[in-house]
Image: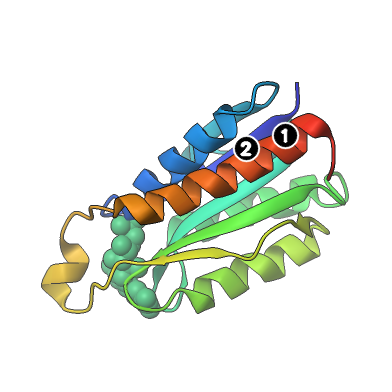
Amino acid sequence: MPRLLLVWWSMTGGTQQLAEALAEGALEERGTEVVSLRADQAHADDVLAAQAFVFATPENLASMAGMMKDFFDRTYYPVLGRIDGLPYATLVCAGTDGAGAARQVARIATGWRLKEIAEPLIVVVGAQTPEQILAPKRIEVAQLERARELGHALGAGLSMGIW
Ligand SMILES: Cc1cc2nc3c(=O)[nH]c(=O)nc-3n(C[C@H](O)[C@H](O)[C@H](O)COP(=O)(O)O)c2cc1C
C-alpha cells in the first residue's frame, strides 16, 4: 500500500489542526497509508519508506519553522537521489503571509527532485499582534476543509497510481 508521509510542526496549534484534517482526507481514500510525524520525530528512514510527502509548517520570521528546517537539515543528504520524482505538497499556516515558508520548502523539494502536485496551501489566521500570534489557534472549518480536500486528492492519486 502506498504510504504518504506527513511531516509537520506547530507551536500554537494551527498547523497541527490543518495537518490532522489533511491526514483525514487522505485516509478517506482506501488503499493509502498515512504516517503523520512531528518534525522532531521524523527521520531519513521515514522519508525513504514513503511514496509521497506533505510538508506542513508555520511561517516564522518569513521562513519555515526552525524545527522543520532541522528536519530537512537532518534528512536532506541521507535521502538525496533516492526519492527522485515522488509527489509532494506543502501546507503553510501563517499570521498574514506564508509565501516565504512555501518558497523555502519548494527550493528544498526541488533539490530532492520531488514533483509538486498542488499549489502550496497557505492558510492565513490573521494574527498580527504579539498577543494574537502567541494565542492558541482555532482554524476555521472552511480552511480545514481545504486541507482535507488536498489530503483527499493526494490519497486518491496515490491509490490510483497517477503520480
Ligand atoms: C516568532 C514568530 C514569527 C512569525 N513570523 C511570521 C511571519 O513572518 N509571517 C507570517 O505570516 N506569520 C508569522 N508568524 C505567525 C505564525 O505564522 C502564526 O501564528 C501561525 O498560526 C503559526 O502556526 P502554528 O499555530 O502551527 O504554530 C510568526 C509567529 C512567530 C511565533
Q: Nearer the viewer, residue 54 or 160?
A: 160
Q: Residue at x 16, y 75 (%)?
A: 130
Q: Position of residue 114 (x, y in %)?
A: 79, 55
Amino acid at the residue labelled 2 = Leu
Q: Nearer the viewer, residue 111 or 90?
A: 90
| Callout 1: CB less than 8 Å from ligand 1 | no
Location of ligand 1 given as a quarter of the image: bottom left
Q: Which mark is residue 16?
A: none
Amino acid at the residue labelled 1 = Ala
* Discs 2, 1 touching: Cβ within 8 Å: yes
Q: Nearer the viewer, residue 17 or 44?
A: 17
Q: Distance from label 2 to label 1 (Cα)?
A: 6 Å
Q: Position of residue 71 (x, y in %)?
A: 56, 51
Q: Quadrant of residue 108?
A: bottom right
Q: Earlier in the sequence, mark 2 or mark 1?
A: 2
Q: Position of residue 55 (x, y in %)?
A: 57, 52
Classify residue 32 as left or right of residue 19: right
Q: Residue at x 67, y 43 (%)?
A: 154
Relative to 79, say whether 26 is above or below: above
Residue position for label 1: 50
Crowdedness of circle 1 by 10 Å Cα count: few (<14), some, many (20+)?
some
Secondary structure of residue under mark 1: loop
Residue position for label 2: 5
Task: Identify the image quadrant of the C terminus.
Answer: top right
Q: Residue at x 65, y 21 (%)?
A: 30
Q: Is residue 44 among the parts visible in the rendering?
A: no
Q: Residue at x 39, y 56 (%)?
A: 143
